[in-house]
């Protein structure tokens, strides 16, 4: 199974999420482990100049459009558009896959808080919070950490 995506499968603040990330997440939640093929490019731009990558050309060969995401199943079925891929994943869970956990009301699991305070569903924080006194990314000790600088004494 191959999933052609633009630049990645990451979460974005875009309303409704990023189409490639939505398609990948639905497949993983259904128990599938697709091979992710990064197509790069940008579909609204002209194919002749900007979308000449192998992934975009393969997507165009399969669907007639350089638009991604595109899923090619193990049975060589081609499914274009994230909404169609999400629907396919829900209708075709992998053998032995468990359904996503839901409460008795059918609601989705609670979202976890991101270290920045934003709420991100199903993702770990981008980086762990810094410990007090730990080295800073740019080098040197954190403010207030380490030995204090000597104060100049009175002049003679």
Image (cartoon, grey):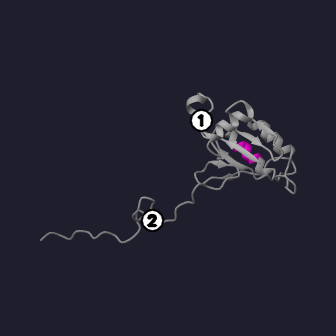
Q: Nearer the viewer, mark 1 or mark 2?
A: 1
> What is the x, y in percent for residue 119?
65, 48
Give residue 148's quadrant in the image: bottom left
Q: Secondary structure at mark 1?
A: loop
Report the residue marked by disc 2: 135
Seen from the viewer's position, the closer of residues 31 and 105 is 31
Compared across the picture, whether 18 is left or right of 28 comes to left
Q: Label 1: few (<14), some or many (≥20) within 10 Å?
A: some
Picture residue at 79% right of the left edge, 48% below the top: 108
> What is the x, y in percent for residue 6?
64, 40
Mark 1 vs 2, N-terminal side: 1
Label 1, label 2: how far apart the Cα atoms are: 44 Å
Report the residue marked by disc 1: 52
Q: Which residues are magenta?
A: 21-26
Q: Number of callouts in the render?
A: 2
Picture residue at 76% right of the left edge, 51% below the top: 28
Position of residue 156 relative to residue 14, above or below, is below
Position of residue 98 relative to residue 131, above or below, is above
């Amino acid at each position: 199974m191959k999933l052609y995506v633009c630049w990645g499968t990451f979460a974005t603040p875009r309303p409704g999420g990023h189409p490639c990330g939505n398609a990948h997440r639905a497949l993983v939640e259904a128990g599938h482990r697709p091979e992710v093929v990064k197509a790069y490019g940008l579909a609204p731009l002209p194919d002749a100049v900007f979308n000449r990558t192998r992934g975009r050309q393969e997507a165009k060969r399969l669907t007639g459009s350089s638009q991604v995401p595109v899923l090619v199943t193990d049975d060589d079925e081609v499914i274009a558009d994230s909404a169609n891929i999400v629907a396919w994943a829900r209708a075709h869970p992998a053998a032995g896959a468990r359904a996503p956990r839901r409460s008795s009301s059918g609601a989705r699991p609670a979202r976890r808080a991101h270290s920045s305070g934003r709420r991100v569903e199903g993702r770990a924080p981008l980086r762990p919070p810094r410990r007090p006194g730990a080295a800073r990314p740019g080098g040197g000790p954190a403010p207030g950490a380490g030995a204090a600088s000597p104060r100049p004494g009175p002049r003679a």
